[in-house]
Image: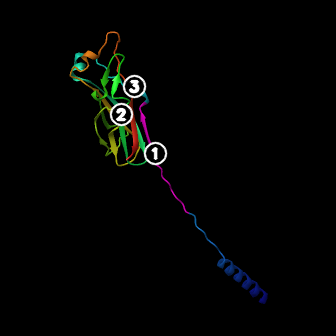
Amino acid sequence: MKSFISILSVILVTLIGSTAFAQTDNATLNIRLYPIQTITVNPTQKTVNLDYKTTADYTDGVSLAQADHLTVYSTGAFIVKVKSASASLTGAKSNIDANDVSISPLAGTSNQLANATYSARNLSNADQTIISSNTGSVNKNFNITYKAAGAQKYVDKYFKTENPTVYTTTVTYTIEAN
């Protein structure tokens, strides 16, 4: 019995003693969020044609609504800007002012972003904000309507040697953190 008590005492002292020598250390865990913004023009709408085919087109102008034209992903508040590659749409024999064309954004027909702000702008070779949001978005869609001048502005811009006479520019959409 005496040896049992001695063994039990040794075990208790060992257990108590080993607890007194335990060590701890800490690690810092960070979740680091970086900004991500992507913008995509609908692949089936990479070319936008505003066709003047009737007298009403020359009188009233021509517009074309592109449903879900832009898709945006942003990890936080963002703005979308638009600009033309130059101040003019260029043709083989003359030019048309880019600011004859207006760009009008709206919420997409699918996967809409609530609470975005939309601003129609006349096209320019300087960036202009057309969409702003105070929240992020995951693949939200936006409709864009392109509208070109009426009031007979282009009556003298057709040339018989070209059918049709084409004026062109590149429209660039840019997304950035807001």
Q: CA separation, marks 2 and 3?
A: 16 Å
Going from N to C along the chain, the mark reached first, 2 or 3, is: 3
Marks 3 and 1: in contact by CB < 8 Å? no
Q: Residues within 10 Å of mark 3 (few under 14, many from 20)?
A: few
Provide the residue designation for mark 2.
83
Marks 1 and 2: in contact by CB < 8 Å? no
Return the x and y of residue 62 as percentages of the image width and height: 27, 23
Q: CA separation, marks 2 and 1?
A: 21 Å
In the displayed structure image, the side of residue 41 where residue 55 appears, left or right: left
Q: Amino acid at mark 1?
A: Ile
Quadrant housing the N terminus: bottom right
In the rendered view, would you say 73 is above or below 67?
below
Q: SS class of the residue under badge 1?
A: loop
Provide the residue designation for mark 1.
36
Going from N to C along the chain, the mark reached first, 2 or 1, is: 1
Return the x and y of residue 69 as percentages of the image width and height: 37, 32
Q: Amino acid at mark 2?
A: Lys
Return the x and y of residue 5 as percentages of the image width and height: 74, 87
Taking the view exactly as shown, the residue that stands out farthest to the top is 161
Return the x and y of residue 175 as percentages of the image width and height: 40, 40
Provide the residue designation for mark 3.
47
Q: Amino acid at mark 3?
A: Thr
Q: Residue at x 36, y 29 (%)?
A: 86
Going from N to C along the chain, the mark reached first, 1 or 3, is: 1
Q: SS class of the residue under badge 2?
A: strand
What span is colored magenta in the figure?
28-42
Q: SS class of the residue under badge 3?
A: loop
